[in-house]
Image: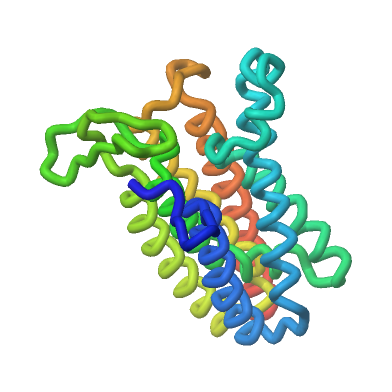
């Protein structure tokens, strides 16, 4: 793999490069969603601030998962090129997104709907940064023909393993497309009454995807034989289902009242 690009005297981490590319793509998707929903605000703010908060949150969550390692080598753990926890990034990014929505006085569920396709796609692209740097996000050994080794990665392995970041990119693109189509359908059919349905689908679909991929990842098990990410995924799925049922119930009640 290629953890770093060397351009003359300049050394560019490929992980950071892909995160920047993910932010750029997410910006264009979010701006397009704002336009179709008639939301007048700066998409740049809703990408830059939550993304930066997500990176910090992902790093902090990761180091706090292993406090012994953190206190033994605090600076190297904090500023290493690898070690980012998905759930920590989700929490911090979500918090920043909520804060911005309230500051801009935009209905929260409408804003979460608008941000969901961009978040799904950005996550998938960011995973390619993990793939290029070989930071340990790959899967367990496999004999499948597309298995790969990462001898030059930040966390090297000579075994042929599942390239799980590639799997996650493919699934993330599919989820982003599904969310975009759900959004288009709900905007045309119900408008504000369906606010929250895209976000609910995002929580369920991304939760399922992450729960399943963890079965072939190398993360340690904790809760009932599950990884931390799987436990967080189940929580995401549960919240998404509850939100979906509430939004659908509100839309049905509104339709009956109107009739």
- In the rendered image, residue 231, in percent from the top left (x then y), is placed at 53, 29
In-front residue for pair 193/181: 181
In-front residue for pair 44/38: 44
- In the rendered image, residue 172, in percent from the top left (x then y), is placed at 41, 58
| Residue 30 picture quarter | bottom right
From this view, report whether residue 129 is shown above or below residue 179.
Answer: above
In-front residue for pair 199/44: 44
From this view, report whether residue 89 is shown above or below residue 115.
Answer: above
In-front residue for pair 233/173: 173
| Scheme by which the image is coloured | rainbow
- In the rendered image, residue 251, in percent from the top left (x then y), is placed at 63, 68
| Residue 71 picture quarter | top right
Q: Tell me: 85 left or right of 73.
A: left
Q: Which residue is drawn at 67% across and 72% down?
A: 193
- In the rendered image, residue 32, in percent from the top left (x then y), is placed at 58, 82
| Residue 50 picture quarter | bottom right
From this view, report whether residue 256 is shown above or below residue 154.
Answer: below
How many numbered circles are shown?
0
* Residue at the front extreme of this rendering: 9
Q: Which residue is drawn at 25% across and 34% down?
A: 161
From this view, report whether residue 151 is shown above or below residue 204.
Answer: above
Q: Tell me: 7 left or right of 81.
A: left
Residue 114 visible in the snapshot: yes
Q: Which residue is drawn at 47% across and 62% down?
A: 7
Quarter containing the C terminus: bottom right
Q: Which residue is drawn at 49% across and 59% down?
A: 18
Residue 202 visible in the snapshot: no
């Amino acid at each position: 793999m290629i953890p770093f690009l060397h351009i003359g005297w300049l050394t560019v981490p490929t992980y950071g490069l892909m995160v920047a590319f993910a932010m750029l793509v997410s910006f264009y998707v979010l701006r397009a969603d704002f336009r179709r929903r008639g939301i007048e605000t700066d998409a740049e703010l809703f990408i830059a601030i939550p993304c930066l908060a997500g990176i910090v949150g992902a790093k902090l969550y990761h180091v706090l998962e292993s406090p012994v390692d953190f206190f033994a080598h605090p600076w190297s753990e904090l500023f290493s090129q690898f070690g980012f926890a998905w759930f920590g990034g989700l929490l911090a990014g979500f918090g920043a997104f909520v804060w911005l929505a309230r500051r801009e006085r935009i209905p929260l569920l409408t804003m979460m709907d608008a941000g969901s396709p961009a978040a799904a796609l950005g996550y998938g692209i960011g995973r390619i940064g993990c793939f290029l740097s070989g930071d340990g996000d790959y899967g367990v050994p496999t004999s499948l023909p597309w298995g790969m080794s990462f001898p030059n990665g930040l966390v090297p392995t000579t075994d042929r393993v599942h390239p799980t970041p590639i799997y996650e990119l493919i699934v993330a693109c599919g989820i982003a497309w599904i969310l975009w189509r759900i959004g288009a359908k709900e905007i045309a059919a119900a408008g504000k009454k369906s606010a929250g349905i895209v976000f609910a689908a995002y929580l369920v679909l991304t939760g399922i995807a992450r729960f399943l991929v963890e079965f072939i990842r190398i993360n340690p098990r904790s809760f009932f034989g599950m990884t931390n990410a799987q436990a967080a995924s189940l929580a995401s799925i549960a919240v998404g289902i509850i939100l979906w049922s509430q939004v659908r119930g509100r839309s049905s009640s509104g339709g009956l009242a109107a009739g």
